[in-house]
Structure formats: C-alpha cells, structure tokens
Image (cartoon, coloured by chain):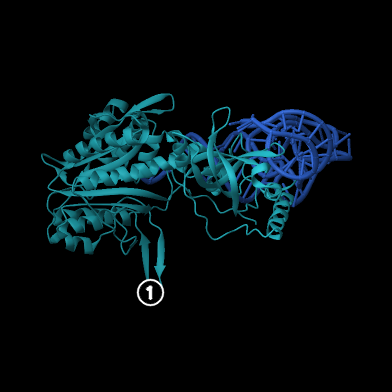
Chain colours: A cyan, B blue
RNA sequence: GGGCCCGUAGCUCAGCGGUAGAGCUCCGGACUUUUAAUCCGGGAGUCGUGGGUUCGAAUCCCACCGGGCCCUCCA
C-alpha cells in the first residue's frame, strides 16, 4: 500500500469518527497525570488501583478481539492502556478500529498491573485528541535515514530515544551554565544580533538589509565587542548565551549558526578563567552524564580538573619539531610549515601559519580536556600582550575530543594599542584576508572611556554538548541543522 | 571546491543485465492480560531525476538533484 493510500485510509477513518459524532481535533483535554505520575501513583498506592487521566501518542496497538492494549507516549515516558469491550461498551469499543499508530488519545481509568507486572490503565473511557494522517516511522528499527532525521527532526524524536536524550542533555547543559554563572554574580544580558560593523572574531558574516534605515547590517559573528562595552559601563560580570552566524562551510564540526556563551569579568585575567572553565565543565558533566568520566568512541573523556595548561609554542614544537619562536619572519615559518605536510599559501602571515600548525598537528591529539596558552599576537587582535613577552598575548583555547571548544583571553584595554591592532587588521583585509577584523570606531570610542582589566571567555555550546554526550557530528546536537534546500514538492 | 560512498514499498533493508523482493507498517479475518502479541489471508513501487548503451537496465555509462564520510576552508 502506497503512502497516498495510507493517507486516504486515515482520512476515511477521520470521516467515520466525525460521522459518529466525535470531534477528532478537540480544543482541549484535561490531562491529570503524566505517564510517569500515573505509574508512580500505582507504585505508592496501598490499596486499590488509583484513578488516572493520561494522554499521549499511540505508539503501539495490540488488538486481541474483545480486548486491546495500546501504548501511549507523552513527554514523561510511556504507559500501557488496556481497553475491554465489556467496560467500554460495544459502540465505543468498535470505534477503536478507527485509531492508528501516531494518533493522540486521552484515557481515563484505574491503574492496575497485568499478570506480567506492567503498570497499566484500564480504560473507563477514551477521547480522540488528534488524528494523524501520516504513518509514523517503523517501530522496531526506528528511523535511520539521517537526511530525514535532520529534515523532519520530529520523526527522529518520535522514533529514536537517543535523539530525545541528546536534546534533553543539551537543555541541561545550558541550564547548568546559567546556574553556574548566576551563582558567581554574573548578569545575563542580551545584545544586538544585527551589527553595523561585524567584529569580535575571524569569520565572514552574513549580510542583510534594513529597509527603513536604508542600510546594510551584518548578522553577528561574535558577542565580544558589545559585552566589553557593558564592562565599560560598569557591569563587572556579564554573560550572554546567543546565536552566532558565520558564513562558511557546513560539516560535522561546523554549522552556519551556532550557540555561543561569552562571559566577561572585570578585575580577572585568563588564569582565573582557566580555573573557572575547569570548575564549570567538570561540575556540569555529572549533571548531564552522571559522572566526570564520559565515554567517547572507544575511549573515555575525563573532565575532572586539573586540565593540562600547555604553551602553544611547546605543543607545536612537540608535535612537529617546529619552534615558531625560531622563525620570527613569515617566510621561514612558511617553509617549515610546508615541510611538516601542511598546505600553505603565499600570502599567509605568521599568525595564520601557526594556526594551521595547531589545527593540523596538535588539535586532533587533544582528546582529553586541555588548555593551550599564550598565543602569538598576530592571531589575537583583541587580546592583551603578555608582560615580558610582547609578541605573545594572554590567551588560551581549550580542546576536548580533538575539537576546539572555547577561547579566552585577558582583554586588550589599551585603546592606543587596540587602534594599532585594528589598523594592522585593516591592512590584512586590504591584502585580501576577508576574515580580518574591521576597524570599529564606535568600539574604540568606548574603549577610550576606559575598560578595567578584564578577562573574557567564549565557549561553543554545541561543541561542549558534543563532548558531554559523545556526539561525533554537530548536527546531532542542533535540532534543525542547516541543509541544502530540497528541490521539488 | 576535490575524492570516495549512498539513494529500491510508509520504515529498515536485500537484489547488481533477463517477470520487483523480505521483515515491520498497512488492509480483511480469528482471538478478553498483550507488550517486536500470535495465527490465517491480501495489498503495497516513476527502483532519486533525465539522457545513453543493449534484443532487454533497479543493475552498465554520462549528467543533474539530495545525503553521508574524508580532504580543502573555517572558532
């Protein structure tokens, strides 16, 4: 039977329900118990079966002649319902024939245990809550087709418990991050998504247009520059959990829109933020995964502190034998980088080359949580120079499962230095680097009003959730990941 | 952008030059404690799309569409 025929059959059932005087899409139903609550009531009952009213989607239907069983699923779980002709009467019992897998049903009755011990509602009456016209995915194998899983995520959530658990875990991570920061006196804020000047990260922005103002806007590529303005304004600790947009490729590690946590703390430096990241992530892991040790592939990730803090220079030296300090000019570093097997391009500067060495040779090996610290200044136009080593900045990135999860630094608060760094970025941009920072005069004015010593942190929430749930693709932790538009009907 | 792989019934998959297949779902029948219910019977397809090769194409070739993985790029 083809899909069209199945839909036609279900529409006929819908018509028969209506003909029997039943509204298949009633406006409301007074559910009194979730599936879980109904089962708990039975478990705590001392005598007799407690009366319950539950509701949910029919996920299994076992007809046995004059009696039937069906399974209802709601947000709390699954519960079995037992329906007898003797109790419901011939007419209501006969109308069960018009029900299908996928329909929503409300049931009132008394809880009891079947002879196999399963908690079950013996229906006194039932109410059709919504008739489904399309069949759900097959019950046993679930839904495997990843394209359908992403394009029609509701079917994935219906069919695959693992998918439900992942997104519950994601919600718990975000809630735990909020609790953690709120408890430390951080203020949660919201800053604009539409930016006149894109900045705060090395990335290409999406461009959009505001009709009434007759001007171009960019979707934000970072939260950074607005949050620093708030520190200037006198909020000592702020954070934002917000959507970021970057106009770049799609893969298992990248989605064009993703969720970033950025936090800024006055009178702190990057050392303090490393302590905070360790504490935050290692306290979230048990809440989400039940332990600080989480399985990942055929290994186990251990989030318990302390995490190693490795100077970037040492990490690259160890993996490649290249000491970037020994290559003060781009030309000689480029040759060394190319010899290590990394593809290089002529116009790349020192910063880009070091970043490539990191990505190619170091990052894949950082399975266990680790900090890389002290980055070259060329890579970090918004970070403060390291005292005694002005070619480095006080910056760290942290890595889990071979992926960068977060980035932080002691913030550059010298407005003169910041202007010079912007000018250097503008030079790179003029030379063809589309991801170099744009000079943001409005931000420079803010900085000239005085930014206290401040440390700032960015964490990719999606990748943190991946690490905590063992997901190997970012699409497994984003409900509706970006896909090509499907042509045709 | 490059390479490899995939697309067959609503779902999960087999078939890989010779009449389109299985399980689940679906439809009809039996069944008052089933739970991947069981038993009997019956349906179900533009084999991603369009070209080509061939007596004959789901199968071989080409292009296109969509997806996956790996490179490239990118936090």
Question: In this view of the protein, which residue sits in the foreground, A432 or A421?
Answer: A421
In the image, residue A361 sits, relative to residue A177, either above or below, namely above
Chain for disc number 1: A
Residue located beneath label 1 in the image: A214
Q: Is residue A384 above or below residue A162?
A: below
User: Circle 1 sits in a helix, a strand or a loop, which is it?
Assistant: loop
User: Residue at 34% of width from left, 54% of height from top?
Assistant: A221
The quarter of the displayed image where residue A306 is located: top left
Measuring from the top left, give residue A263's x and y in whole percent: 24, 48
Question: For residue A143, which quarter of the picture?
Answer: top right
A489 or A340: nearer the viewer: A489
**Residue A134 picture location, percent across and down:** 65, 50
Q: Would you say residue A364 is visible in this rendering?
A: yes
| Residue A100 shows in this picture | no
A28 displayed left or right of B46: left
- The crowd level at tag 1 (other Cα within 10 Å; few <14, some 14-19, many 20+) is few
Please state, as top left, top right, bottom left or bottom right, where the C terminus of chain A lies in the image: bottom right
Furthest toward the left, the residue is A388
* Side of A60 relative to A432 (left or right): right
Q: Residue at x 17, y 50 (%)?
A: A412
Quadrant for residue A366, please give it. top left
| Front-lying residue, A387 or A278 | A278
- In this view, the residue in front, A273 or A40, is A40
Q: Residue at x 38, y 56 (%)?
A: A205
């Amino acid at each position: 039977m083809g899909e069209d025929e199945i839909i036609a059959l279900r529409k006929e059932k819908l018509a028969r329900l209506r003909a029997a005087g039943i509204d298949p899409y009633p406006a409301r139903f007074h559910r009194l118990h979730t599936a879980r609550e109904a089962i708990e009531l039975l478990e705590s009952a001392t005598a007799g079966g407690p009366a319950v009213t539950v509701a949910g989607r029919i996920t299994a239907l076992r007809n046995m002649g004059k009696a039937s069983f069906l399974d209802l699923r709601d947000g709390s779980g699954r519960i079995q319902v037992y329906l007898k002709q003797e109790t419901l009467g011939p007419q209501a019992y006969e109308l069960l024939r018009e029900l299908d897998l996928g329909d929503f049903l409300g049931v009132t009755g008394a809880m009891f245990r079947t002879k196999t011990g399963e908690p079950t509602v013996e229906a006194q009456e039932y109410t059709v809550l919504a008739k489904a016209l399309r069949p759900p995915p097959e019950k046993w194998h679930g839904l495997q087709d990843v394209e359908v899983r992403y394009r029609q995520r509701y079917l994935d959530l219906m069919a695959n418990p693992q998918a439900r658990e992942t997104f519950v875990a994601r919600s718990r991570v975000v809630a735990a991050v909020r609790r953690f920061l709120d408890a430390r006196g951080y203020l949660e804020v919201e800053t604009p998504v539409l930016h006149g000047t894109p900045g705060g990260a090395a990335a290409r922005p999406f461009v959009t247009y505001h009709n009434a103002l007759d001007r171009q806007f960019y979707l934000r590529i970072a939260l950074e520059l607005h949050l620093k303005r708030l520190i200037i304004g006198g909020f000592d600790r702020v954070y934002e959990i917000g959507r970021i947009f970057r106009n770049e490729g799609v893969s298992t590690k990248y989605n064009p829109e993703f969720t970033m946590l950025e936090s800024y703390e006055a009178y702190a430096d990057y050392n303090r933020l490393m302590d905070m990241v360790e504490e935050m992530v290692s306290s979230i892991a048990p809440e989400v995964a039940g332990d600080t040790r989480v399985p990942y592939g055929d290994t186990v990730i251990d989030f318990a502190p302390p995490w190693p803090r490795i100077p970037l220079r040492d990490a690259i030296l160890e993996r490649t034998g290249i000491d970037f300090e020994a290559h003060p000019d781009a030309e000689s570093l480029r040759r060394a980088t190319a010899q290590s097997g990394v593809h290089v391009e002529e116009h790349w500067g020192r910063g880009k080359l070091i970043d490539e060495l990191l990505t190619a040779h170091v990052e894949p090996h950082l399975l266990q949580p680790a900090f890389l610290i002290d980055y070259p200044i060329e890579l970090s136009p918004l970070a403060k120079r390291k005292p005694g080593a002005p070619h480095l900045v006080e910056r760290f990135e942290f890595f889990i499962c071979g992926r960068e999860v977060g980035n932080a630094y002691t913030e550059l608060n010298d407005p003169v230095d910041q202007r010079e760094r912007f000018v250097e970025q503008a030079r790179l941009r003029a030379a063809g680097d589309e991801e170099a920072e744009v000079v943001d005069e409005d931000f420079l004015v803010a900085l000239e009003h005085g930014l206290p010593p401040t440390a700032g942190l960015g964490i990719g929430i999606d990748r943190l959730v991946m690490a905590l749930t063992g997901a190997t693709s970012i699409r497994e932790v984003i409900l509706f990941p970006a896909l090509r538009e499907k042509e045709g009907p």
